[in-house]
């Protein structure tokens, strides 16, 4: 069974984000940070967030870590989707992405940008964990904003 042209495009974009990730590295100033590890496959990711002066808008974001093509591509896609968004918008994007890759049908997916191309991972439950790792790290980092947690905040995940 061959890939359709759309499948080929999605695969090319996913590979591009994995091989040439956007926003990968460290930020100078960090307002929120979280590192997560998926113990079932070994993917590790740390997400760093820099907020605007009011603490309401993502001014910059970065990620670092190692993992499979899906986890690295998803992290790259996520960073592109959230810069310039309010915390409420990011919370909505997190839920939309989670729904998308878990087989639910979110109403709006346009704001996800390239991340919408990961919809196909829903067919592979173990890959859903890879795709959502960076998004869960982002969500946890933002939950901890202002809590005084240091940059070594990390944990293993999976429910």
Image (spheres, rainbow, N blue to C red):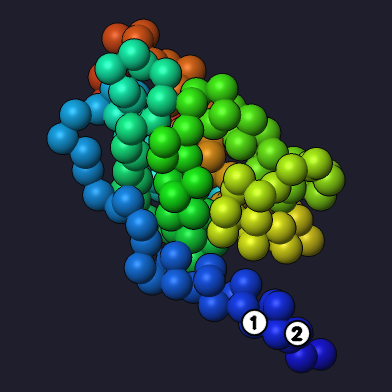
Q: Residue at x 44, y 65 (%)?
A: 17
Q: Secondary structure at mark 2?
A: loop
Q: As drawn, is 34 to the left or to the right of 101?
A: left
Q: Position of residue 147 (x, y in %)?
A: 36, 8
Label drawn at residue 4: 2
Determine which of the numbered discs, if any, sits on residue 108 in the image: none
- Please state the horizontal and vertical placement of residue 115, each as a whole percent of the image: 58, 55
Q: Taking the image as drawn, is residue 133 in sight?
A: yes
Mark 1 near mark 2, Cβ–Cβ under 8 Å?
yes
Q: In the image, residue 2 lies at what x, y percent?
A: 76, 91
Residue with the mark numbered 1: 8
47 left or right of 29 in image:
right
Closer to the camera, 155 or 55? Answer: 55
User: Residue at 70% of width from left, 77% of height from top?
Assistant: 7
SS state under label 1: helix
Q: Is residue 45 above or below residue 149?
A: below
Q: Is residue 20 above or below residue 109?
A: below
Locate the N terminus and report the quarter of the image it occupies: bottom right
> Going 80% across and 41% down the picture, which residue do you hit?
107
Give the CA separation, mark 1 to mark 2: 6 Å
Extreme bottom residue here?
A: 2
Q: Is 59 located above or below residue 19 in the figure? A: above
Residue found farthest to the top = 147
Asked where in the image residue 95 lies, by quadrant, the reply is: top right
| Observer-nearest of 62 and 72 | 62
From the viewer's perspective, is 102 left or right of 48? right
Residue 33 seen in the figure: no
- Disc 2 crowd rating (10 Å Cα; few below 14, some 14-19, many 20+) is few
């Amino acid at each position: 069974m061959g890939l359709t042209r759309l499948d080929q495009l999605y695969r090319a974009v996913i590979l591009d984000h994995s091989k040439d990730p956007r926003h990968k590295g460290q930020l100078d100033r960090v307002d929120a940070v979280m590192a997560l590890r998926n113990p079932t496959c070994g993917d590790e990711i740390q997400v760093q967030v820099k907020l605007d002066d009011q603490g309401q808008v993502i001014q910059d974001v970065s990620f670092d870590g190692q993992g499979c093509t899906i986890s690295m591509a998803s992290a790259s896609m996520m960073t592109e989707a959230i810069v310039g968004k309010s915390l409420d918008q990011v919370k909505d994007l997190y839920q939309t992405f989670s729904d998308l890759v878990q087989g639910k049908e979110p109403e709006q997916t346009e704001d996800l940008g390239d991340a919408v191309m990961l919809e196909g991972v829903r067919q592979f439950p173990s890959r859903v964990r890879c795709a959502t790792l960076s998004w869960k790290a982002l969500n946890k980092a933002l939950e901890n904003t202002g809590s005084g947690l240091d940059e070594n905040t990390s944990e293993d995940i999976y429910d």
